[in-house]
Image (cartoon, rainbow, N blue to C red):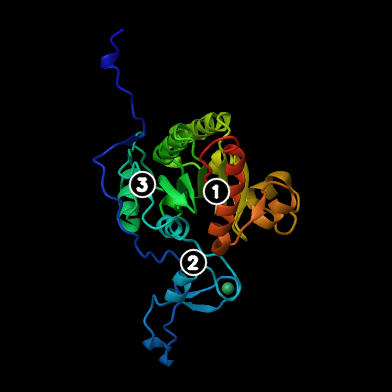
Amino acid sequence: MDTTSFVKKNIGFENVEPALTPPPVKTTSLPRKPKLSGGKSRKKEIPEGLWAKCPTCAAMIFDKELDENLKVCPKCNYHFQISARERIHSLVETCTFEEMDAAMTSVDILNFKGASTYKSKLEAYKKNTTLKDAVITGLAKIGAHRVALGVMDFNFLGGSMGSVVGEKLTRLIERGTEKELPVVIISTSGGARMYEGMFSLMQMAKTSAALAYHAQKKLPYISILTHPTTAGVMASYASLGDLILAEPGAMIGFAGPRVIKDTTQAELPPGFQTAEFLLDHGLIDAIVPRKEMKTQLVEYLDFLAAGKNNGKKSGAA
Ligand SMILES: [Zn+2]
């Protein structure tokens, strides 16, 4: 067989010229800004976009203060959504993040047409988020540990998993396996990307298989679930961690509570599908507030790598 003529097909994504990782962009990816135009009151003079209202305690928080507090409400500890770049910045050692597949973009393989086309959606989200897709992957150092790190971003099409998200994570896990590194994936997702139909669902099997090879080498995988982590993502790599952590108050599940309630015709218990509920029921291992995430991760990696490095010269810890 002439193997030189064999070309691996890329289905649902394309590789374009690699680009430098753009610098972190201050995105204010918060829920609706409170309307400050209070009729005749002098509040009208306050410019919009400077404040955010906490959906839990209704506190008005300066955007700057919120940014400095890693998008956590200083009054009630509510965790606002945070972009993938901000999260990477908060976790890895300075200048250690080497992004992988930075320029990989989705292709409208099904020629999807609905209220708007997939193509136009992709264009709009790329422009608004300055992301290429819903995940950023790369190698980085957290504390003294080199890790393969994948971080999802809910701002890009609801963090939905299409071919690019699946492929980038699979390549990340494979790189981790090859270099014998722990894998850390931080998820936030509404599930599979409907615009890619079956191709999107296939990513569940692909990422899970890559993790199985990673596990065969006895390498640790830490999955971190943030608000919300649901459906196809929760039903694949997000729930396969050796250690599964979650942020406080995160909504985690497969189908939404309304669907479950309608299907089972039963009242759902209070707090159903929250991180706290799942911790009580043994589905996750710990709830870690965002501000403690880095310290905790280093501690867990120390512990997991200690076993891995038994009898080896190089102690990562
Ligand atoms: Zn609050």
Q: Position of residue 116 (x, y in %)?
A: 35, 48
- Nearer the observer, disc 2 or disc 1? 1
Nearer to us in this view, 56 or 82: 82
Residue at 47% across, 57% down: 91
- First along the sequence among labels 2 and 1: 2
Q: Amino acid at mark 1?
A: Ala
Disc 1, SS:
loop
Disc 3, SS:
strand
Q: Which circle marks residue 85 in the picture?
A: none
**Horizontal placement of 254 versus 112: left or right?**
right
The residue carrying pointer 1 sits among few (fewer than 14), some (14 to 19) or many (20 or more) residues within 10 Å by Cα, namely: some
**Horizontal placement of 313 versus 281: left or right?**
left
Residue sitting farthest toward the top: 1
Q: Which circle marks residue 317 in the picture?
A: 1
**Horizontal placement of 122 versus 247: left or right?**
left
Q: Is mark 1 within 8 Å of ligand 1?
A: no
Q: Could one spot residue 206 in this view of the protein?
A: yes
Disc 2, SS:
loop
Which residue carries the number 2 mark?
70
Nearer to us in this view, 108 or 181: 181
Position of 262 relative to 72 (above/below): above
Position of 155 relative to 178 (above/below): below
Q: Which circle marks residue 99 in the picture?
A: 3
- From mark 3 to mark 1, how far is it between C-alphas? 24 Å
Q: Position of residue 144 (x, y in %)?
A: 49, 51
Position of 300 relative to 111 (above/below): below
- First along the sequence among labels 3 and 1: 3
Q: Position of residue 22 (x, y in %)?
A: 30, 55
Q: Is mark 3 within 8 Å of ligand 1?
A: no
- From mark 2 to mark 1, how far is it between C-alphas? 26 Å
